[in-house]
Image: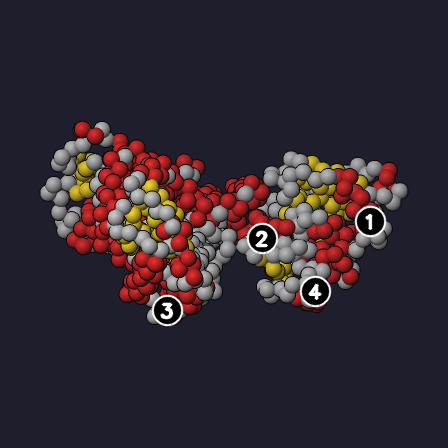
């Protein structure tokens, strides 16, 4: 698909329109048929609509032409968007509706009176320029709202090539900004990216067989073939790179619009005024540029200094400045001097204003001067569905989140560099934290950190997932859980930094990755590990709490109570006569009613089974649960019948025995597709083997349920190796059979 093919489609549509106008009896005086929008720009995709308007002046009655001109077009099978308007009505509509005004900036004559079309084009453009200062704030608000709804082309898992930030709609609006004469947009960069994105849109239409703008996952292979690229991954890099470029130009242009609108009309300076803000760096308007006489070849720190000043002041780093520094700046010495490290930390800790500066460094090639390893993760998609962004953007967002936590740590510089490098190992076959450790060590050494700080940064990269994974999938009251973390994080300082990095990483991934529940688990575990490190010993297992057993339970009944104090959910306590399989029945109760389970703990007290369930639902109807549980206990309702899965399991389950996770229980880790009923099925399978589940800890990572079960023999403590292997095999077979796989996110 090429520009020539779009022009050919446009020419064929033009001929249809001209013939239709003549056949309808259209005149060459006072009336014209015009193309607007993409058709006006001669950019028809295979399944584009024809946007046409029959416009006439007040002295001309369109008569039968207005009703007859459309029939030949309909008969040809094209998708037609049409209207009939007086010329003054067109101007009024453009004045009152930004979308109409944007479409009319691209009008093109098709048939009829060319002077009328010219008058309309001239009047629309004059009106747009005259009212630009008043209209641009509304246009900017419209753009921001669209971005919030559609996300970014460079990052969205299913991007909209037209509506997403960095898409074709933004490219069109940038052309409209240029038409105001208030700001300039780099025309060559914009046009090259826009035309390449039009080629992609043509291929998307061809792949889908209809006029769609969203790129579904299965389309990437077709796009790779159409773009003559080796594979789907290359197609993603190409398309998302175009989106990144247009999004960068859009943000740059809107910042310049803001600067123009802040200045009174009559006082805008005719010549740039330079204000020196740092050695070799000056402020010009709202942009950071090089000061007069600055020589990048003699000052290797000039690039970092300019970037840090721009980020800290929330100003633009002028792309021509960044481009010149990318070409001419002297290489940083190896190792870096202390001032270079300080400038990098200032840049990384600038908060949200880091993003536009980092984008400018990346788009101009200047980032390679600072961190050549960035190419390892540039435009790399995340394998985990829980992440909102590509890996490189996620890293920048992690730095932004970490910047808000630097007051909580003793070494902010170590935290910020660890945030920058924590995912640098992604993209290979080796687990990314393992692969990233030596890379982080090498980069930290080059940056001139001391040997102890180099080791600390490397260890933070290696273990940046340790706290979150352990807190959400292990029993927090088991001393072995604390020991697992303390084994790898040996000092309170390292733990302090790891806790902050964990929070920043999770917040940057997605809101659900740092929910109030997850935050509490991580921070509670961090507190226990800190006490263990400071005291030099592991905590003891807490005593099982003694509960008052109501007479109803002693007489064979059960009770349910609810405490709403749990973060983002509530705590449900159930007391009932003790028996193997009790936990399975309760898990079935929650799964049947789609109540998300986060964790469960059970213990025995004088023949009574006490279980406490933390669920991710803030309100629970106790009376409703009681009636359903009665039906399960009395055999009137069987969870297995209602939880049976009819759809094939897309994600093969894995079941592993974690031998080092506890000294008092056998720990079984289950990973399965995110569907209702996992906890119930696992507990039912184990109950059939006369195995007790002492606690369950439930988590969901994208489409995958990650559940951990602490097991004991009904009367003899931990399972033998043979029994543990048999239990793992039985659970794996049950899950693979599809008899109730599930997820904590939807009520396991």
Give the mark nearer the N terminus: 3 vs 2: 3
- Identify the secondary structure beneath mark 3: helix
With 160 as the anchor, is 136 left or right in this view? left
Residue 219 image-quadrant placement: bottom left
With 560 as the anchor, is 200 left or right in this view? left
Q: Residue at the location (38% across, 70% down)? A: 225
- Estimate how packed mark 1 is, as few (under 14), some (14 to 19) or many (20 or more) residues with alpha carbons within 10 Å: some
Separation (CA) of disc 1 from disc 2: 29 Å
Give the mark nearer the N terminus: 3 vs 1: 3
Closest to the camera, between mark 3 and mark 1, is 3
Separation (CA) of disc 3 from disc 2: 37 Å
Q: Residue 700 carries which label?
A: 2
Residue 39 image-quadrant placement: bottom left
Give the mark nearer the N terminus: 1 vs 2: 1
Q: Residue 631 carries which label?
A: 1
Task: Between residue 482 and residue 242, name the one nearer to us.
Answer: 242
Separation (CA) of disc 3 from disc 1: 59 Å
**Quarter of the figure that contains the N terminus:** bottom left
Separation (CA) of disc 2 from disc 4: 20 Å
Give the mark nearer the N terminus: 3 vs 4: 3
Q: Name the residue under label 4.
A: 734
Residue 552 screen position, x and y as percent: 86, 39
Q: Name the residue under label 3.
A: 226
């Amino acid at each position: 698909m090429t520009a020539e093919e779009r022009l050919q489609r446009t020419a064929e549509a033009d001929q249809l329109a001209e013939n239709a106008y003549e056949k309808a009896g259209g005149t060459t005086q006072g009336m014209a048929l015009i193309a607007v929008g993409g058709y006006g720009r001669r950019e028809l995709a295979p399944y584009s609509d024809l946007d046409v308007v029959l416009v006439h002046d007040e002295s001309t009655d369109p008569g039968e032409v207005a009703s007859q001109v459309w029939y030949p077009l309909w008969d040809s099978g094209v998708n037609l968007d049409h209207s009939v308007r007086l010329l003054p009505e067109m101007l009024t509509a453009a004045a009152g509706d930004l979308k109409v005004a944007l479409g009319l900036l691209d009008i093109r004559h098709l048939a009829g009176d060319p002077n009328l079309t010219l008058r309309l084009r001239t009047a629309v453009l004059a009106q747009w320029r005259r009212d630009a200062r008043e209209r641009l704030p509304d246009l900017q608000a419209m753009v921001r709202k669209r971005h919030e709804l559609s996300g970014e082309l460079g990052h969205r898992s299913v991007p909209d090539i037209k509506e997403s930030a960095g898409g074709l709609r933004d490219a069109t609006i940038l052309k409209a900004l240029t038409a105001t004469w208030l700001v300039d947009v780099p025309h060559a960069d914009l046009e090259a990216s826009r035309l390449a994105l039009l080629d992609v849109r043509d291929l998307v239409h061809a792949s889908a067989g209809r006029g769609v703008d969203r790129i579904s996952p299965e389309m990437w292979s077709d796009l790779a073939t159409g773009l003559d690229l080796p594979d789907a991954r290359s197609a993603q890099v190409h398309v998302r790179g175009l989106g990144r470029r247009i999004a960068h130009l859009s943000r740059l242009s809107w910042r310049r619009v803001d600067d123009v609108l802040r200045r009174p009309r009559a006082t805008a300076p005719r010549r740039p005024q330079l204000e020196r803000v740092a050695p070799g760096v000056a402020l010009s308007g709202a942009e950071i540029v090089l000061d007069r006489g600055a020589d990048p070849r003699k000052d290797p720190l000039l690039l970092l200094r300019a970037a840090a000043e721009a980020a800290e002041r929330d100003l633009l780093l002028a792309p021509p400045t960044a481009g010149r520094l990318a070409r001419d700046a002297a290489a940083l010495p190896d190792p870096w001097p202390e001032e270079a490290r300080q400038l990098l930390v200032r840049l990384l800790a600038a908060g949200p204003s880091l993003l536009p500066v980092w984008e400018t460094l990346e788009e101009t090639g200047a980032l390679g001067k600072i961190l050549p390893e960035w190419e390892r993760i540039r435009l790399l998609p995340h394998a985990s569905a829980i992440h909102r962004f590509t890996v490189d953007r996620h890293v920048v967002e992690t730095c932004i989140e970490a910047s808000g936590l630097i007051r909580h740590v003793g070494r902010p510089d170590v935290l910020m560099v660890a945030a920058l490098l924590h995912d640098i190992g992604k993209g290979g076959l080796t687990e990314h934290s393992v692969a990233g450790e030596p890379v982080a060590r090498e980069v930290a050494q080059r940056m001139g950190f001391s040997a102890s700080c180099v080791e600390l940064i490397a260890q933070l990269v290696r273990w940046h997932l340790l706290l979150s994974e352990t807190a959400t999938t292990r029993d927090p009251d088991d001393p072995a859980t604390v020991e697992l973390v303390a084994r790898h994080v040996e000092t309170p300082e390292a733990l302090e930094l790891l806790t902050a990095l964990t929070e920043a990483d999770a917040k940057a991934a997605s809101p659900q990755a740092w929910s109030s529940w997850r935050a509490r688990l991580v921070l509670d575990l961090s507190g226990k590990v800190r006490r263990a490190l400071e005291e030099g010993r592991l905590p003891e297992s807490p005593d099982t709490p003694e509960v008052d057993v109501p007479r109803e339970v002693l007489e064979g009944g059960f009770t349910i109570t609810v405490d709403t104090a749990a973060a983002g959910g509530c705590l449900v306590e159930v007391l009932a006569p003790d028996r193997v399989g009790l936990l399975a029945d309760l898990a079935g109760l929650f799964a049947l009613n789609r109540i998300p389970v986060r964790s469960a703990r059970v213990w025995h007290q004088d023949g009574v089974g006490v279980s406490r369930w933390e669920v991710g639902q803030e309100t629970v109807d106790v009376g409703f649960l009681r009636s359903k549980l009665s039906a399960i206990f009395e055999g009137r309702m069987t969870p297995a019948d209602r939880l049976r899965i009819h759809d094939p399991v897309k994600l093969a389950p894995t079941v592993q025995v974690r031998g080092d996770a506890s000294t008092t229980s056998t720990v079984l880790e289950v990973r399965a597709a995110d569907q209702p009923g996992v906890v119930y099925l696992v507990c039912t399978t184990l109950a059939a083997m006369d195995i007790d589940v002492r606690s369950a800890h439930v988590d969901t990572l994208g489409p995958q349920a990650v559940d951990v079960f602490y097991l004991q023999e009904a009367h003899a403590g931990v399972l033998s190796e043979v029994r543990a292997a048999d239990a793992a095999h039985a659970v794996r077979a049950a899950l693979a059979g599809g008899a109730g796989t599930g997820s904590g996110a939807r009520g396991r």
